[in-house]
Image: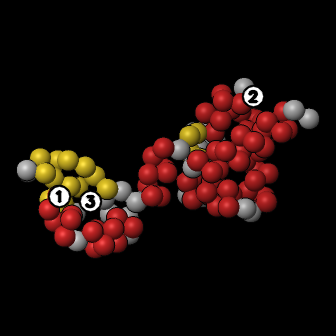
Amino acid sequence: MKITSTELRQSVSVVLDTVKEGEPVHITRSGRPCAVLISADRYLHTIGVTVQDVADIAGVGITRVLWAVSQIVQAQGVEAMMISVANKGRPVTRDTLLGPEAALAVTVAVLKEKNT
């Protein structure tokens, strides 16, 4: 969807519904591209970190991080849902993208295991 900034002001709720459904909205001002609105899910996916990033941050090997991911997935918490949504059912690897909540949960689990 492409709209002008004036149209955006006049129909914010319709635009937000469109974005929530997953369609990005391109906004123009004076005929030039100005911004793109995307859903919160898409934004989280965009700013997520990989399993390898977590390993680097925690200063541990990838095996420990994959272990932590498996523990969280087995627990079936909110973090597990974030992992499976981001990974779309594929096996978790070093390149698996984790949303912020999942990345934090995995990092905490790795650091707890590392310090025991």
Q: In the image, what residue type sits under mark 1?
A: Ser
User: Left of 28 or right of it: where is 88?
Assistant: right
| Residue carrying label 3 | 25
Instruction: Give the CA distance from mark 1 to mark 3.
Output: 11 Å
Residues packed near mark 1 inside 10 Å, few (<14), some (14 to 19) or many (20 plus)? some
> The C terminus lies in which quarter of the figure?
top right
Q: Position of residue 100 (x, y in %)?
A: 58, 47
Q: In the image, what residue type sits under mark 2?
A: Val
Q: Position of residue 70 (x, y in %)?
A: 76, 50
Residue at x 21% of width, y 64% of height: 8
Quarter of image, res 39 = bottom left
What label does residue 66 carry, if any? none
Above-or-below relation of 1 to 90: below
Q: Position of residue 12 (x, y in %)?
A: 27, 68
- Mark 2: secondary structure: loop
| Residue carrying label 2 | 60
Residues packed near mark 2 inside 10 Å, few (<14), some (14 to 19) or many (20 plus)? some
Q: In the image, what residue type sits under mark 3?
A: Val
Give the mark nearer the N terminus: 1 vs 3: 1
Give the mark nearer the N terminus: 3 vs 2: 3
Q: Nearer the viewer, mark 1 or mark 3?
A: 1
What label does residue 5 carry, if any? 1
